[in-house]
Amino acid sequence: MTLRIERSARQGFTVFTLSGRMKAEQVPELKELFDTDYRSIILDLQEMRLADRDAVKFLRSCERDGMTLENCPAYVREWMDREED
């Protein structure tokens, strides 16, 4: 299972839909895609099935920098919250 990234637009936002498994080696690729203001980006994580620790840390930093995370799986949200401690 690999990570699939789809880009679309919605009401002035760029929406990236992530599907599959997100691993540390995909973080640099995502950073290149997110070369704009994070506040104008929405990450839809509904189809994301697995994430490793580096991916979760990256998602947490994206949200902290103003990116919106939609449909975040409960286990990812809980992990992100624990990483803050």
Image (cartoon, grey):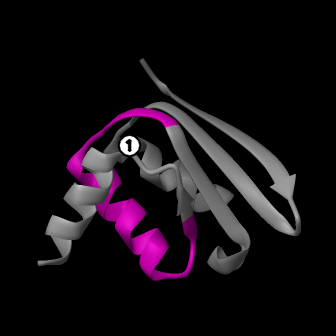
Position above or below: 48 against 36: above
| Rendered residue at 45%/43% (across/down) | 26
Q: Which residue is mark 1?
A: 25
Front residue of this view, candidates 55 and 74: 74
Within 10 angstroms of label 1, few (less than 14), some, or many (20 or more) residues?
few
Q: Is residue 28 magenta?
A: no
Residue 75 x %, y %: 25, 46
| Rendered residue at 31%/57% (across/down) | 77
Position above or below: 7 against 70: above
- Rendered-image quadrant of the N terminus: top left
- 10 displayed left or right of 69: right
Front residue of this view, candidates 46 and 29: 46
- Rendered-image quadrant of the C terminus: bottom left
Instruction: Give the amino acid at mark 1.
Output: Glu
Q: Is residue 63 magenta?
A: yes
Q: Which residues are magenta?
A: 47-68
Residue 30 x %, y %: 56, 53
Position above or below: 68 against 53: below
Report how many numbered discs are placed on residues in the image: 1
- 48 displayed left or right of 7: left
| Rendered residue at 22%/51% (across/down) | 53
List the single residue furthest toward the top: 1
Residue 17 x %, y %: 64, 42
- 46 displayed left or right of 38: left
| Rendered residue at 51%/49% (across/down) | 71
To which quarter of the image does residue 52 belong?
top left
Helix, strand or loop status at disc 1 = helix
Residue 18 x %, y %: 56, 40
